Image (cartoon, rainbow, N blue to C red):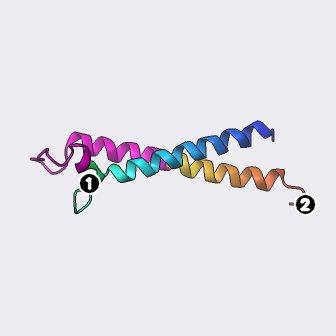
């Protein structure tokens, strides 16, 4: 497999790791979390979670899936590319 494939996966892995960290920190925890620091704690939710929280959950899951796919892709690339395997 070409070397640019590995560099692309590594770049995508670094980007998704950073995004995943930020998205997880933005979730509201039991104490309010980081989202309350940015004004998310002032909104009251009438029906459970708000649209913003649902979208944040969706984005977090999507970035997590891409992150996991990068890990698996790099593992497969290393298995194919390394000599003696």
- Which type of secondary structure does the marked residue at label 2 adopt? loop
**Residue drawn where x is 21% and y is 43% of the image:** 39
Q: Is residue 52 above or below residue 73?
A: above
Q: Nearer the viewer, residue 48 or 34?
A: 34
Label 1: which secondary element: loop
Q: Earlier in the sequence, mark 2 or mark 1?
A: 1
Q: Identify the residue at image location x=44%, y=44%.
A: 62
Quarter location, residue 52: top left
User: In the image, which residues are magenta?
Assistant: 36-64
Residue 4 part of the magenta-drawn span: no
- Assess disc 1: are there few (<14), some (14-19) or many (≥20) residues with their C-alpha within 10 Å of its C-alpha: some
| Image location of residue 36, percent across then percent down | 22, 50
In the picture of the structure, the residue carrying the numbered disc 1 is 28
In the figure, is residue 84 to the left or right of 65?
right
In the image, taking residue 33 as reference, residue 46 lies left or right, namely: left
Q: Position of residue 47 (x, y in %)?
A: 12, 48
For mark 2, does the 10 Å Cα neighbourhood hold few (<14), some (14 to 19), or many (20 or more) residues? few
Q: Please provide percent x and percent y for residue 43.
A: 14, 44
Residue 84's disc number: 2
Task: Choose mark 2 or mark 1, whichever is in front.
Answer: 1
Tally of numbered tags? 2
User: Residue 85: which quarter of the image?
Assistant: bottom right
Q: Marks 2 and 1: CB-CB under 8 Å?
A: no
Above or below, 75 against 7 in this view is: below
Residue at 48% in and 50% down: 64
Residue drawn at x 84%, y 55% is: 82
Q: Is residue 25 left or right of residue 81?
A: left
Q: State the image coordinates of residue 3 (x, y, percent, origin top left).
A: 79, 40
Foreground pick, 38 / 54: 38
Q: Nearer the viewer, residue 51 or 14?
A: 14
């Amino acid at each position: 497999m070409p070397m640019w494939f590995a560099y692309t996966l590594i770049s995508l892995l670094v980007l998704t790791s950073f995004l995943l960290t930020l998205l997880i920190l933005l979730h509201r925890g039991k104490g309010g979390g980081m989202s309350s620091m940015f004004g998310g704690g002032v909104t009251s939710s009438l029906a459970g979670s708000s649209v913003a929280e649902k979208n944040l959950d969706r984005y977090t899951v999507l970035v997590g899936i891409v992150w996991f796919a990068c890990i698996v892709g790099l593992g497969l690339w290393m298995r194919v590319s390394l000599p003696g395997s």
